[in-house]
Image (tube, helix red, strand yellow):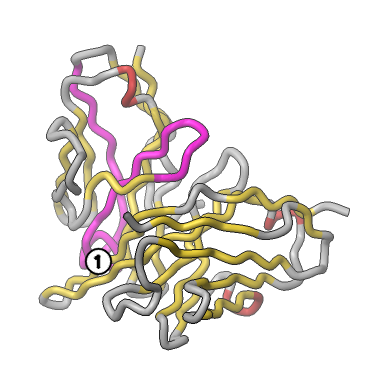
């Protein structure tokens, strides 16, 4: 059972906009920054969004992050086949004194 | 360009100690701005942070694993290492090393991992 809750799956067709949610509590998302990682099949995770809504250089602006209260969201617009991957949210948890991850969301591009 | 590479045995017997090393290239592990961390991922499951170390040797661990984990650093070799004792089948996972960056801005903390090594699968089995 992960500390941060994500839907196990999401899907969309090419060109669509998809959102993935991440729910936490006041001790993690509610008080700290949220990060998102993309894990393509058979590869290591890659930083996708940092500090709630910032994109590292090289990440397309089709990817965007937001945070409100104790929840966060990752939005992918103009969906492409190469976006098919697992997506994880993460944050520091003040109560646990640990970095915590969501359980991951498998995105399928139909 | 910073790169990290994990190395170590791919098979460990139950009750023994898992040992892995991460070699950092393209940058110094002694940078004052970063920690260096270990994260694992059981087959078909999600990510779990194990712990992180500063070049001075200061560490912090996931409380759920703290009693079994030791992370150390060798600045002369630009490496850091993980030891996980008393392993069981539940410790079977891909183990990743990564640069751990953390900031605090107006009491808001941020922790992220970038870049990551390619990962190494460690199987616990007799």
Where residue B107 sits, quadrant-wise, is: bottom left
Residue pointed to by mark 1: B110
Residue stretch in magenta: A16-45
- Pick whichever, B30 or B90, lies toward us: B30
Image location (x, y in percent) of residue B2: 35, 58
Q: Secondary structure at mark 1?
A: strand
Residue drawn at (48%, 31%), measured in percent from left and top?
A41
Residue drawn at (47%, 80%), measured in percent from left and top?
B75
Rendered position, B70 above or below B95: below
Query: Which corner quadrant holds the C terminus of chain A?
Result: top left
- Which chain does the numbered disc 1 sit on? B
Image location (x, y in percent) of residue A31: 21, 67
Rendered position, A85 above or below B16: above
Q: Residue A55: say if magenta.
A: no
Few, some or many residues within 10 Å of mark 1 (<14, 14–19, 20+)? many
- Pick whichever, A22 or A46, lies toward us: A46
Residue drawn at (29%, 81%), measured in percent from left and top?
B32
């Amino acid at each position: 059972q992960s500390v941060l809750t994500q839907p196990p799956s999401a899907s969309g067709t090419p060109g669509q906009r998809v959102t993935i949610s991440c729910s936490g509590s006041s001790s993690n998302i509610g008080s700290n920054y949220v990060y998102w990682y993309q894990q393509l099949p058979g590869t290591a995770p890659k930083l996708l969004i940092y500090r709630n809504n910032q994109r590292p250089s090289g990440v397309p602006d089709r990817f965007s992050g937001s945070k409100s209260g104790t929840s966060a969201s990752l939005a992918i617009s103009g969906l492409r086949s190469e976006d098919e991957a697992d997506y994880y949210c993460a944050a520091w948890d003040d109560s646990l004194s640990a970095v915590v991850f969501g359980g991951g969301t498998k995105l399928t591009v139909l | 360009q910073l790169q990290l590479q994990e190395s170590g045995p791919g098979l460990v017997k139950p009750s023994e100690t898992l040992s892995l090393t991460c070699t950092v290239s393209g940058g110094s592990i002694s940078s004052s701005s970063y920690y260096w961390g270990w994260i694992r991922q059981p087959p078909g499951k999600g990510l779990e942070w194990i712990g992180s170390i500063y070049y001075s040797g200061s560490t912090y661990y996931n409380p759920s694993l703290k009693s079994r984990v030791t992370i150390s650093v060798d600045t002369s070799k630009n490496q850091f290492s993980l030891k996980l004792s008393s392993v069981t089948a539940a410790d079977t996972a891909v183990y990743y090393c990564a640069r751990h960056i953390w900031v605090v801005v107006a009491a808001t903390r941020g922790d992220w991992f970038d870049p990551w090594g390619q990962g190494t699968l460690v199987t616990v089995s007799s």
